[in-house]
Every structure is written in structure tokens, then in C-alpha cells.
Amino acid sequence: MMELTRKGEYAIRGIIYLAQQQPGKVSLISEIAEASGAPQSFLAKIFQSFAKLGIVSSFRGTGGGFTLGRSPASITLREVVEAVEGPIIPNRCLLDGGVCDRGKDCKVHPVWRTVQTQVTQILESVTMEELARK
């Protein structure tokens, strides 16, 4: 089912922290971890995957750390969640290649599809800029 893991929670908190900083300010992973209540090594792995996706930019060496890779207005909650949790799938029957043999006969399948669509739209409509302000 679709439940946000601890990894997802840490990821969201860490990105919101970066979104609250002055543009261009490089934040140490230790600062981000402390602010988001996340174990530093765990958060570092999450942020490495964010860097590959361009959600954050990473800087090595002395004074190294992270900044947002793009403006907080252009980073959606959906993007952050899916980067760590994978696609939003409320039921396994919506997986590609389906694990359900009921197919077109299932009356609940369209309901799960609607849930998936609406949750995705809600998460897509929320930006890191909005969350950083609240």
C-alpha cells in the first residue's frame, strides 16, 4: 500500500530545510540532518540520489554540502516523494505487467486508478516553495 516511509519523511524535511535557506547558501549534511531529525549517514544517501536527479546540487571538500538544484517553486512534493519511494501505487494491481489476473472484470480497479490519479495530482500541486513558507 501507499505509506510514506521514514526515508520519505526525512527526505521531505531535508528538502524543506534547504528551501528555507537563502538562495545559493550551501548547507552541510550535518545541519540538514539535525534540522530534519534524520541520521546523517542515512540522509547523505538520500541526498546523493537527489543530486543524481538534479533536485539538489552537491559540493565536495571544505565548505561542501548541498543547495537546491532548482528553484523551490519548481520542485514538487510528488517529485521528492517519488525520488525516494518510487511511483505512487495505492494497490499492486496498478503495477506495470499487473499482478492481478482479474483485469477488465475487476470493479475496484478503476477506483484504485482514481485514487492514484488524485493523490498524484495533489502531490504535484504542492511545491517546496509553499512548504518552506508554512
Image (cartoon, rainbow, N blue to C red):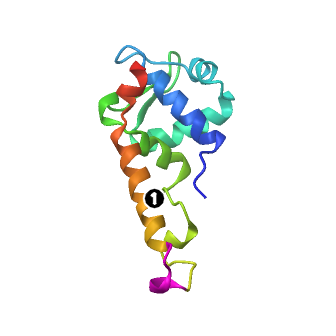
Work out whether residue 104 or residue 37 is closer to the camera in this orientation and state it: 104
- Is 82 rendered above or below residue 80? below
- Is 15 rendered above or below residue 118? above
Give percent across and percent down for residue 126: 37, 36
Q: Residue at x 36, y 44 (%)?
A: 124
At 43% from the left and 51% from the top, the residue drawn is 119
| Magenta stretch bounds | 102-108
For badge 1, the amino acid type reads Val
Closest to the observer, 68 or 114: 114
Residue depicted at x 48% and y 86%: 105
Q: For numbered disc 1, what is the local secondary structure?
A: helix
Question: Outermost residue, front direction?
Answer: 107
In the rendered view, would you say 86 is above or below 78? below
Residue 41 appears anywhere in the view: yes
Viewer-side residue, 87 vs 41: 87
In percent of width and height, residue 102 lies at 54, 85
Q: Is 119 in front, or is 60?
A: 119
Q: Quadrant of the C terminus?
A: top left
Q: Position of residue 117 (x, y in %)?
A: 39, 58
Q: Percent x, y for residue 12?
A: 52, 34
Instruction: Give the tally of numbered discs.
Output: 1
Tell me the residue that label 1 is attached to: 115
Residue at 61% x, 58% y is 1
* Picture quadrant where residue 99 is located: bottom right
Query: Is residue 107 in the magenta section?
Result: yes
Relative placement, left or right, of 91 versus 72 is right
